[in-house]
Amino acid sequence: QLQLEESGPGLVKPSETLSLTCIVSGDSINFNSYYWDWIRQPPGKGLEWIASIYHNGRTHYSPSLGGRVTTSVEASRNQFSLRLTSVTAADTAVYYCARHREHYYGQWGQGTLVTVSP
Amino acid sequence: DIQLTQSPSSLSASIGDRVTITCRASQSVRFYLNWYQQKPGKAPKVLIYGASSLQGGVPSRFSGSGSETDFTLVISSLQPEDFATYYCQQSFTVPYTFGQGTNLEIK
């Protein structure tokens, strides 16, 4: 059974880089037909799609993040990663990784809260 | 970007009630519209995908309909475990977008 687990620091200083990893277990990240996505949710607010990566490295990014975001796959470790540069308090959120298959998110990680604060 | 507008934003209902939540897209998403349920402190869970397909394991009291720009989620008879926040999401084109959410509360 597929499981996703986000990991990374829970506190990041303003202007620094947020880095998260999603560890995938129960399936190969290399299997085609899947996209691996990042979604975030500021406290008390709605869901925002951030980025998507295919197993071959093809990526899509939210234009609202202004080029600050990158995602990559580390196939040998069956995980994928998110980097968000120049963070501000507005980037404080619960960050989820999720598998995008057949046009919907069938599996999600449990989410990890990242707070941007001095 | 495709904007998704859900209505209502919040809703109070009783056990056994029939509840309808709508989602309107700013342009056609064909049938690439999904519905998720989220409970506090938990990740969202897909209920309906492709506008009307029920995800495995989801009770049949949940149903979805619609196409192009207008979609509906119906809960035919509310159960205690259904009180949560519901989101629609379009997967027709990037950037994928979500509705603002509908908070379903106990009356």
Image (spheres, coloured by chain):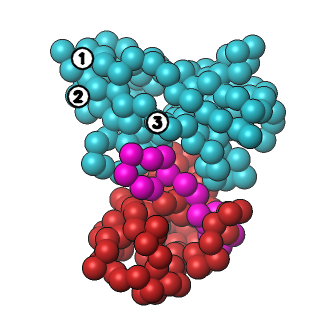
Chain letter, red in picture = B
Q: Is residue B37 visible?
A: yes
Look at 50% across and 84% down and name the residue there: B77
Marked residue nearer the N-terminal end (3 or 2): 2
Q: Which residues are the magenta region? A: B38-53
Instruction: Give the labeled residue for mark 2.
Output: A89
Q: Label 3: chain? A: A
Secondary element under disc 1, as helix, strand or loop, is loop
Amino acid type, callout 3: Gly
Marks 2/1 same chain: yes
Amino acid type, callout 1: Pro
Query: Residue B51: x, y in percent?
Result: 62, 70
Q: Is residue B50 covered in magenta?
A: yes
Amino acid type, callout 2: Ala
Residue in front for this viewpoint, B100 or A62: B100
**Side of A76 where B97 appears, left or right:** left
Secondary element under disc 3, as helix, strand or loop, is loop
Q: Is the Cβ of the residue at disc 2 closer than 8 Å to that at disc 1?
A: yes
Instruction: Give the labeled residue for mark 1.
Output: A14
